[in-house]
Image (cartoon, rainbow, N blue to C red):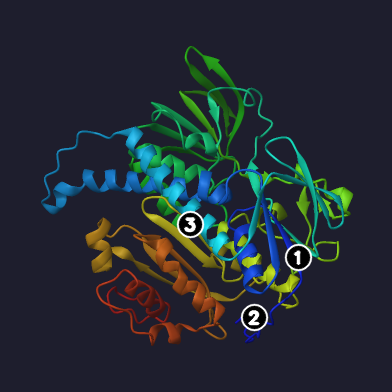
């Protein structure tokens, strides 16, 4: 099912498909193209799995899981469990992270082989609309052509033009933050987005003194404001210092530490930190592709596509981070499937309305659909159902009932417009909200769905009930 229509897939024969990039968008596109009968070649300049598997989603979550275990140990006595902690073995933390990464990369390698996808190691650049020069690791080059091409070149950490950042050994990006020899004594994070918040959470659990500096008035600008404020309060209770409406002016040196000058609402203040994590976002990694030689339209490296994922050049498609739009692995994967299908004769447009955003803090934070802020901007007449997790038995057991579930609905038809969850396993539960939005489900349809007890997902139904002023487990106001 795509766009509500059942699609019949016809096998494509004698069609060559080249995929540039082996990340979660590229390898998925390659596998889907092979499933549809194409002769597929995938070009990857580093390791299969891309940023996500190697230096992004997966290794970050491995560190965060270790941090979650530390968090649970700190509260074990509340449950009558006497644990004597001897601290942690950082080398083993990194070793476990590496083992998970290697297993998943090996899995991708096996899947590509099973689907008869040819993998080329090297850096690709266009020499024409459908012609690529691939520079191999041994310095040799190979020219290849394809009937269809899908660009999945990904992204790299962005480095802001802050004096003293570039070339400073104390300043690290998210990649370096995943392989530090030891947790730093102190860490200043520039940027209060997903990457900054997650790594701040992880290192705080391992005893690092963390300060987050964010230029905007709020953290996590794409997430629900009310729950973001709640998360901020929880992080500050754990000792993380958070400064918003604060601009980093420069990074210098004071003894063996970095000295960070910050403009805090007109007042200059200096902060000392062993490491400075630059987490202001990512930029497209398309510089080596020579897009102009193929005639591919782009905006300073951000490839422009239509809803079919087609570029300005016929039979050339682009997906994922290299578009410079929604830089999420699951978006790249969804676009990869769609681009492969469209390249091989099927036509369907990409719709991101069911795209969830996930933040792997402790507790987790996830949202899909409209936030109150975006609903107000669009002038939508909406209502809200809110259920605090202290009234949910499973959440109370898991983390003391910290968090809440919030549902936005349209007042005219009672359709679900947005679902936002702050609490245990929020990122695992958000799929129900995405499904509800995709099916244009109403509050009543969520309410009529029996949810298992005891689970945190019961609170999704309770939030829908609260929207209609008939919640069972909290007083209705």
Q: CA distance from mark 1 to mark 3?
A: 24 Å
Give the secondary structure at mark 3: helix
Instruction: Classify the position of the N terminus by image quarter.
Output: bottom right
Q: Which residue is mark 1?
A: 16
Q: For mark 2, what is the residue?
A: 3
Nearest to N terminus: mark 3 or mark 2 = 2
Depth check: 120 or 65 in front? Answer: 120
Q: Is residue 146 left or right of residue 175?
A: right
Q: Residue at x 38, y 73 (%)?
A: 460
Residue holding disc 3: 107
Residue 255 shown left or right of residue 32 in the figure: left
Residue drawn at point x = 38 percent, y = 26 percent: 185
Q: Residue 240 at x, y = what percent?
A: 39, 38
Give the x, y percent position of residue 364: 40, 56
Q: Earlier in the sequence, mark 1 or mark 3?
A: 1
Cα distance in 3D space between marks 1 and 2:
27 Å
**Distance CA(mark 3)–CA(mark 2):** 30 Å
The mark that comes first in sequence, 1 or 2, is 2
Tell me if I can see residue 56 in this picture. Answer: no
Left-right relation of 393 to 405: left
């Amino acid at each position: 099912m795509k766009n509500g229509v059942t699609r019949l897939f016809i096998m494509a024969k004698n069609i060559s498909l080249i995929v540039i990039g082996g990340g979660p968008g590229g390898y998925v596109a390659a596998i889907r193209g092979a499933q549809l009968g194409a002769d597929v070649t995938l070009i990857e300049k580093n390791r299969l799995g891309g940023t996500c598997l190697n230096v992004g989603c997966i290794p970050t979550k491995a560190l965060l899981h270790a941090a979650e275990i530390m968090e649970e140990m700190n509260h074990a006595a509340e449950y009558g469990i006497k644990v004597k902690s001897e601290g942690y073995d950082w080398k083993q933390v990194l070793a476990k992270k590496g083992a998970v990464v290697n297993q998943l990369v090996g899995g991708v390698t096996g899947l590509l082989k099973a689907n008869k996808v040819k993998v080329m190691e090297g850096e690709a650049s266009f020499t024409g609309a459908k012609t690529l020069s691939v520079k191999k690791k041994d310095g040799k080059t190979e020219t290849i052509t394809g009937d269809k091409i899908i660009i999945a070149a990904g992204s790299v950490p962005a480095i802001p033009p802050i004096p003293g950042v570039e070339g400073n050994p104390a300043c690290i990006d998210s990649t370096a933050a995943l392989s530090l020899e030891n947790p730093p004594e102190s860490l200043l994070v520039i940027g209060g987005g997903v990457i900054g918040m997650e790594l701040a959470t992880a290192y705080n659990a391992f005893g690092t003194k963390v300060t987050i500096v964010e230029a905007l008035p709020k953290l996590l600008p794409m997430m629900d404001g009310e729950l973001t404020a709640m998360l901020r309060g929880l992080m500050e209770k754990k000792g993380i210092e958070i400064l918003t409406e604060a601009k980093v002016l420069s990074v210098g040196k004071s003894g063996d530490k970095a000295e960070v000058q910050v403009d805090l609402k007109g007042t200059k203040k200096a902060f000392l930190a062993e490491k400075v994590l630059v987490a202001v976002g990512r930029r497209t990694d398309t510089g080596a592709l020579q897009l102009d030689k193929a005639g591919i339209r782009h905006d300073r490296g951000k490839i422009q596509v239509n809803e079919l994922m087609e570029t300005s050049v016929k039979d050339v498609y682009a997906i994922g981070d290299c578009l410079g739009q929604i830089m999420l692995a699951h978006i790249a994967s969804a676009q990869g499937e769609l681009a492969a299908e469209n390249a091989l004769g099927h036509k369907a447009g990409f719709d991101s309305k069911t795209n969830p955003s996930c933040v792997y803090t402790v507790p987790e934070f996830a949202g899909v659909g409209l936030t109150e802020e975006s609903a107000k901007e669009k002038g939508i007449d909406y209502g809200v159902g809110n259920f605090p997790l202290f009234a949910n038995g499973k959440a109370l057991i898991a983390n003391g009932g910290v968090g809440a579930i919030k549902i936005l609905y349209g007042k005219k038809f009672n359709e679900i417009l947005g679902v936002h969850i702050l609490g245990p396993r929020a990122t695992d539960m958000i799929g129900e909200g995405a499904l509800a939005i995709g099916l244009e489900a109403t509050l009543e349809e969520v309410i009529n769905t029996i949810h298992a007890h005891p689970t945190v997902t019961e609170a999704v139904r309770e939030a829908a009930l609260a929207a209609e002023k008939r919640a069972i487990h909290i007083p209705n106001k």
